[in-house]
Image: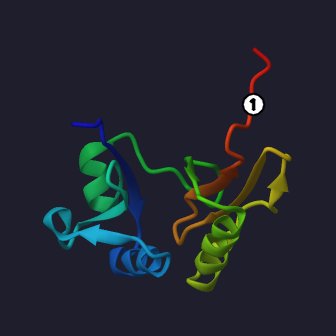
Amino acid sequence: MDTQIFINLPVRDLPKSLNFFHSLGFSHNSQFTDDTAACIVISPVIHVMLLTEAKFREFAPRGICDTSQANEVLICLTCESRDKVDELVRQALAAGGSSHEPPTDYGFMYQHSFLDLDNHGWALMYMEPGAKICNS
């Protein structure tokens, strides 16, 4: 079995956040979804657990970052094309997200990003097949 990743994010309004990610084309796993949490399926091995702030505090009692003042996280996902990167950013903005930074073209890699409804950072990138990113 492949190692899976479950990214836990606190959200202020679970139904709105669930709708936001549905609008990006992601599904959710109802087995791990209730009134306090929703499991967003990014891929077979990548999941995002959207947790109400009260539920999040059960797992992380040190406090919740004020994402209007500081970056809590920047999650980076790969996409199959530059067009898919831009499409997901357009969908995020249309669903109520905001722009994080303008797109950047590094030649071998294209990146664009957005903030979700709770200001969690999402970077999307497309890398040219066979691109060499290190000098070693």
For residue 115, which quarter of the picture? bottom right
Tell which residue pokes out farthest to the bottom in this image.
Answer: 94
Which residue is labeled 1 in the image? 133
Amino acid at the residue labelled 1: Ile
Q: Secondary structure at mark 1?
A: loop
Q: Nearer the viewer, residue 37 or 83?
A: 83
Q: Nearer the viewer, residue 52 or 110?
A: 110
Tell me residue 59's x, y (percent). 27, 44
Tell me residue 135's x, y (percent). 80, 19
Residue drawn at x 30%, y 42% as measured from the top left: 4
Tell which residue pokes out farthest to the front in this image.
Answer: 130
Q: Nearer the viewer, residue 110 or 101?
A: 110
The quadrant of the image that shows the C terminus is: top right
Side of 6 where 89 appears, left or right: right
Side of 132 where 5 appears, left or right: left
The quadrant of the image that shows the N terminus is: top left
Above or below for 32 versus 19: above
Tell which residue pokes out farthest to the top in this image.
Answer: 136
Residue drawn at x 75%, y 31% as measured from the top left: 133
Above or below for 74 versus 100: above
Tell me residue 58's x, y (percent). 24, 48
Side of 20 where 123 appears, left or right: right
Q: Nearer the viewer, residue 34 or 26?
A: 26
